[in-house]
Image (cartoon, rainbow, N blue to C red):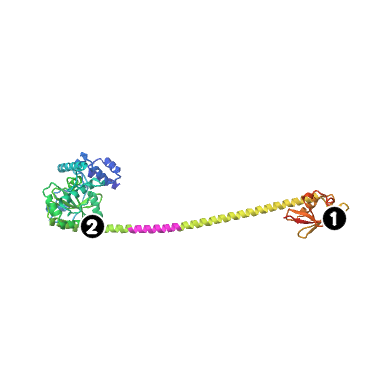
Amino acid sequence: MSDVADKIAYFQAITGVEDADLCTEILAAHGWDLELAISTFTSSNSSENHHSATDYASEPTTSTNLPPEETGLVAGGTAGQPPGLAWKIITLPFSIISGSLGLISGALGFGVWAAGGVLSYSLRMIGLNSGRNGESTSPLVSVSASASEAMNFVNIFERDFGSIRPNFIAEGFMDALQRSRHEFKLLFVYLHSPEHPDTPMFCERTLCNEALVAFINENFVSWGGSIRASEGFKMSNSLKASRFPFCAVVMAATNQRIALLQQVEGPKSPEELLTALQRVLEESAPVLVSARLEAEERRTNIRLREEQDAAYRAALEADQARERQRREEQERQEREAAEAERKRKEEEEAHERAAREATEREAALAKMREEKLLSLGPEPDKGPDVTQVLVRFPTGERKDRRFHCTSTIQSLYDYVDSLGCLEVEKYSLVSNFPRTVYGSEKLALSLKDAGLHPQASLFVELNS
């Protein structure tokens, strides 16, 4: 919640919108992207946005006539006076420029900015805004309003004063501030006043001095803006620029704030400006080194955490793979055990079924033999009407019995079946001399009619 409240307060300070609910709606509509919301809002041509004269940084908490030791600001006229302490970072909260003096100076500056902005916009719309050689200074791709202003300033500055210049970042102020923070450098700010009589001489002899340019490009991130443009005008009010040419050194602070470390106002020689920049660079070196070390330590910690996380993930994946293999092996064994159990049960059921069927079949055969034995009746005594029959089995076993001569061949088959000496059901009774097969067609013949009376010798022939 504190981050949301900071963004709302920051947006109110920049845009001058006092309604917190309206600010919340605008930020939410832009996905809480502070820079995008501010760029969209400030790029509007409505008069109420221009007259609010909002700033990226607020007024100092103390008035400008206080000693530099209290305000942390080193004026250009007193650039040679050393500060009481090494240096102090004064965090400037972003708020609306208020008070009669602020309104008057804001109105005067706005008049110049609005006239130039409307003229520049009109020329861009009809395609007449081009460089010295007729080359268009408009970007080929869509960029934010602040970035467009920065690119236009860089092009015009290089056109008027040459290519030996500080490497001004062609981005909005906040982007340049963040770039300086990421590169662990201070941000050198130059506010350009085209109408000021000292501006051309300062730019040609001081700001474009080769030694000074080399020092600035090596040790600072540079940002420049014209006070005739929206963002340059707002920064001139934010940094309380009272004299031109105006230079400042700032750095990013916490909670969407900036720290003003040095400001140089009025025309200065290259040596004077270089001395001021060297001094603020020396004073801020411990802070920058500490920030760089802290960032490196954070990156190292992040890398170590990432390596530890990667090692943990690898170990976890290996454990998961082993666990997965163990589960798969266990499942395979369980499947095999289940399959073996199923087969065992099937075999047991088959054996039980076969035994049951064999028992049933044996019972049926026993019942059949008993029935056939009963159908034969008692064996008759010897007599003239009794036939003696001898039956030989393939095993060599012999069985004999007496039958009435009127008994049929079927009675002989019933007799053989009742003995239970055969494991097959299909067989034939055959006599040798002469060979006669008493098959199904002779079952109804009596023993006498079949020529088997008074005695007969038959053998069992198994059918294939």
**Residue at screen point 25% across, 43% down:** 40
**Quadrant, the C terminus:** bottom right
Amino acid type, callout 1: Gln
Q: Which residue is mark 1?
A: 455
Q: Nearer the viewer, residue 283 or 159?
A: 159
Chief SS of the magenta region:
helix
Q: Nearer the viewer, residue 119 or 283?
A: 119
Q: Percent from the top left, x then y, of residue 180?
A: 23, 54
Q: Secondary structure at mark 1?
A: strand
Residue 114 lies in quadrant? top left
Q: In the displayed structure, would residue 230 be above or below residue 288?
A: above
Q: Percent from the top left, x then y, of residue 265?
A: 13, 51
**What is the count of numbered marks?**
2
Instruction: Please state the extent of the stretch shown in magenta in the rendering.
Output: 303-321
Q: Percent from the top left, x then y, of residue 434?
A: 82, 56
- Separation of residues labelled 2 and 1 (CA atoms): 137 Å
Mark 2 or mark 1: which comes first in sequence? Answer: 2
Q: Nearer the viewer, residue 109 or 87?
A: 109
Q: Percent from the top left, x then y, of residue 305?
A: 34, 57
